[in-house]
Amino acid sequence: MKSLLASILLLAGSASAMAQMSPVGLWRSVDDKTGESKAEIRIAESGGGLQGRIEKTLRKDAKPDAACDECTDDRKGKPMVGLDIIRGGKKAEGKDVWEGGKILDPENGKEYRASFTPIDGGKKLEVRGYLGPFWRTQTWTRAQ
């Protein structure tokens, strides 16, 4: 009985560790240029891909009623809080990276191809946005 209980606890612990090596969860986005926390983003799996929404804005100068005025698609004019900024992205076979998704920069309304790579044991998330051959990487920290 004790070995069964120990096995269950070991499996539960390893499942928890594996869950952390995923982009799913609550993340604090950090501006790669200023180091300032910008927002809390909740990433979930939906329909076989990733979906991420702004749960809370953290910038000191953020307006509570701010909307995505720069957006050019179905998100135009939508409130920043609750805004869907990550769409798609699936785990690459044999790697801890989620590729094929898109990420929106609500400050300029541009959408970029994106990849998401958990690092530092899942405590951080490397978010890379691509525009042609150029890319920009931000490292987000897990908030939960």
Image (spheres, rainbow, N blue to C red):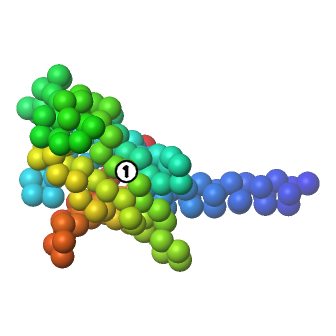
Q: Is residue 106 left or right of residue 144?
A: left
Relative to 125, residue 81 above or below? above
Note whether residue 27 is visible: no
Relative to 94, residue 76 above or below? above
Q: Which residue ends up furthest to the top in the rendered image? A: 65
Residue plotted at (37% across, 50% down): 87
Could you say which quadrant of the image residue 15 lies in? bottom right
Total tally of numbered discs in the picture: 1
Q: In the image, what residue type sits under mark 1?
A: Arg
Could you say which quadrant of the image residue 79 lies in? top left
Assess disc 1: are there few (<14), some (14-19) or many (≥20) residues with their C-alpha within 10 Å of its C-alpha: many
The quadrant of the picture occupied by the N terminus is: bottom right
Residue plotted at (47% across, 46% down): 44
- Residue 57 versus residue 90: which sits nearer the camera? 90
- Residue 137 versus residue 69: which sits nearer the camera? 69
x and y, in percent, of residue 18 in the image: 57, 61
Relative to 10, residue 83 above or below? above
Note whether residue 12 is visible: yes
Residue plotted at (23% across, 42% down): 73
x and y, in percent, of residue 77 in the image: 19, 30
| SS class, disc 1 | strand
x and y, in percent, of residue 9 in the image: 73, 54
x and y, in percent, of residue 75 in the image: 25, 37
Residue for badge 1: 87
Residue plotted at (48% across, 54% down): 49
Q: Is residue 99 left or right of residue 71?
A: right
The quadrant of the picture occupied by the C terminus is: top left
